[in-house]
Structure formats: C-alpha cells, structure tokens
Amino acid sequence: MALALEYEGISKEYCSWSRRRPVRALQQFSLSVERGEVFGFLGPNGAGKSTAIHLAMGFMRPTSGAGRMLAKPFGDAGTRRRVGFLAENVSLYHRRAEAAIGFYGGLNGLHGPALDRGVKSALEAVDLHSEAGRSVSQFSRGMLQRMGLAQALVNDPELLILDEPTSALDPAARVSIRELLLGFRNQGKTIFLSSHLLSEVELVCDRVAILSHGRLLRIGTLKEMLATTGQVEIVAHSISNTVFTDSMVDGERLRFTVPIGRQREAIERVWSEGGEVVSINPVRRSLEELFLELTNPVPNDVVAGESGTVS
Ligand SMILES: Nc1ncnc2c1ncn2[C@@H]1O[C@H](COP(=O)(O)OP(=O)(O)OP(=O)(O)O)[C@@H](O)[C@H]1O
Ligand SMILES: [Mg+2]
C-alpha cells in the first residue's frame, strides 16, 4: 500500500520558560494516509492538528517518534517540492498576485515558461486570474485564502496539505474549491485537510480522523463512522399516529424510529394495523453529532488503532 503520510508513535511537547510543565500537543500519535485519498483531519481547537501538519512539513521535529511524507522522512527538502501546503493563517508579501505566486513557484524549483504556466493555472484554479496584476495588500480575507491555495497549487503537487482552507470563503467560492479538490483527487493526488467546517468535510473526504488533546479518538471512512446509531427510521402509510409513540405525521405518512433489533416487530405491527411500510433506513448521524459526542466531555485515556473506535 503506497502511503502519502505516515505518523508513527509521534509525541510533541512544547517547552517554554514561562510554563513549568511542557504542553503535550501530540501523544503517541499514529496515522497513515493512503495515496489518492481525501483525508479529513478533525479536532477541537488546540487538539494538535496544526502541530501534526507542521511536523510533516519539517518545520519542527517531534519530541519522539518518526514519520514519512511520500515515503521520505519528515523534513526531507526534496520531498517538500512535491507537496503543496496551505497554512491556517495566510500571510503573503505585499506584491502583485502573480508575483507573489511566482515567488512560491520559484521556491519550489520552477522557472521560465514552466513557472509562468504554473502561476497562470494556479490563479485560474482559484478564480483570481482577473486579479493577477493587483497588489495582495488590497485583497479581502477570502481572496487571501484563495491566494494561499494558489501558492499551494503552483508546483502541481502530488500531495496537498491544507490547514483550514475554506474558513473565510463565501458559499460560491466554497463550492468551486470543493470541485477543485475533487478534481485534484480524480487525478490520483492526495489531499490531507484539516477543517472545522464539518459539512464541507462530509462532502469531500473519503476518510476522517478525529483528534482530541493530542490523541487519536476515531479513524475510518465516513460511511463507517456515520452509519451506526443502532436505530432505523420506518416510514409507513395508512396507519394511525397513535400506534407508535414518538411518531411524526408527514403528510399522509407516519415516521418513527425504533432500535434495529425491534425492526421486525415494528413492521409486523404496521401490517397488523392495516398499514403499509414505505421505507426502512438506518439512521445516520451527522459528522457534527459524532464530533460532539466524541470530543465532549474530555476523553479517557485512549490508544490509537485503525478503523472504528479506538479503545
Ligand atoms: N509554539 C507553541 N508553543 C507552545 N505551545 C504551542 C505552540 N503551538 C501550539 N501549542 C499548543 O499545542 C496544542 C496544540 O495546538 P495546535 O495549534 O496544534 O492545535 P490545532 O488542533 O491546530 O487547533 P486549532 O483548531 O485552534 O487550529 C495547544 O495546546 C497549543 O496551545
Ligand atoms: Mg490549527
């Protein structure tokens, strides 16, 4: 299995003279991201997401443990040129947009016509080509975030690492960035995405990991994570709303929820009352519900493991 990112038992402590104890930003953190997937990296403020991303980019070293990005140890300079990175706070030199993106293309080894092509296609990808000659100092927050994405795309990377890429975008820009990311995935590239916009994550990610207090709480496909509430919703018609408690009248239909183990009994009850079953569907929780369930209250000690609840 080709991996885009691998964290192996990584811990990161921040020490400072003003605090007696170090801050444990990551604790025995292990995670593998496969090539070609869109991976959502979620967690409350301070969970350790940006720390994990900065370690992969080689901006700092782990206190213990090791990791690889595109099969090379974290911090490998040559590998950085094959990766696009968007930081959570975009800060760019105050110069014309095309010059600002060209600067990053140059840092990634592009020059001449290849650099011109890279700048043009990156600005087009984020819909800023018409603003190419304007100074970045005049850009709005959303435009700056799109510039941040353009600089991440300029070297046509194999792996995109995005720390909060759409937080400042309006709905139309979000839709176009979502399409951009899905197009990127369709080219066989990998996206590692940290975001608090859980509805966006639900729309683009294949797998997600939820981190809290520097530890991995849950990892899996969205389908696995959201399917199981242990309840099914049954929709029936031609039946009185007094038959099932907590049922909801929806036009001519009645909706109610029962535990999976009592599904058969409920269906037989509908029939015996002269009604008909229209549909039976497992109740999916939203990613937001799962996120809140896992991250509140503070979790007990947990150990990382692949797929499903980590115990
Ligand atoms: N340079 C630093 N010095 C000391 N502590 C730090 C430093 N950077 C981060 N931390 C601490 O490490 C922990 C993890 O921070 P991190 O920025 O990785 O979280 P995050 O998940 O990205 O949060 P957010 O969603 O708010 O961006 C926090 O407790 C934070 O205070
Ligand atoms: Mg962060």
Image: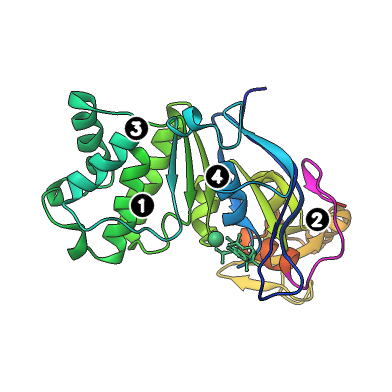
- For the residues labelled 4 and 1, the Cα–Cα distance comes to 14 Å
C-beta proximity under 8 Å, tags 2 and 3: no
Q: Is residue 7 visible?
A: no
Residue that sits furthest to the top in the current view? 1
Instruction: Give the structural element (helix, strand or loop) at label 4.
Output: loop
Q: Which residue is mark 3?
A: 155
- Where residue 47 appears, as percent x and y from the top left, is 66, 62
4 or 3: mark nearer the eye? 3
Q: Amino acid at mark 2?
A: Ile
Magenta stretch, main secondary structure class: loop
2 or 3: mark nearer the eye? 3
Q: What segment is highlighted magenta in the picture?
A: 296-310
- For the residues labelled 4 and 3, the Cα–Cα distance comes to 23 Å
Instruction: Give the structural element (helix, strand or loop) at label 3.
Output: loop
Q: Residues within 10 Å of mark 3 (few under 14, many from 20)?
A: many
Residue placed most toward the observer, 310 or 284: 310
Question: In which of the image's four quarters is ligand 1 placed?
Answer: bottom right
- For the residues labelled 3 and 1, the Cα–Cα distance comes to 23 Å
Residue that sits furthest to the front in the current view? 17
- Please determine whether, in this image, residue 78 is positioned above or below residue 38: above
Q: Amino acid at mark 1?
A: Val
- For the residues labelled 2 and 3, the Cα–Cα distance comes to 58 Å
Query: Which mark sits nearer the N-terminus, 1 or 2?
Result: 1
Q: Is residue 66 visible?
A: yes
Figure quadrant of the N terminus: top right
Q: Which residue is mark 4?
A: 205
**What's the residue at 76%, 70% (across, down)?**
21
- Where residue 259 appears, as percent x and y from the top left, is 83, 60
Q: Which residue is mark 2?
A: 267
Query: Which mark sits nearer the N-terminus, 3 or 1?
Result: 3
Could you say which disc has been placed on residue 175 in the image? 1
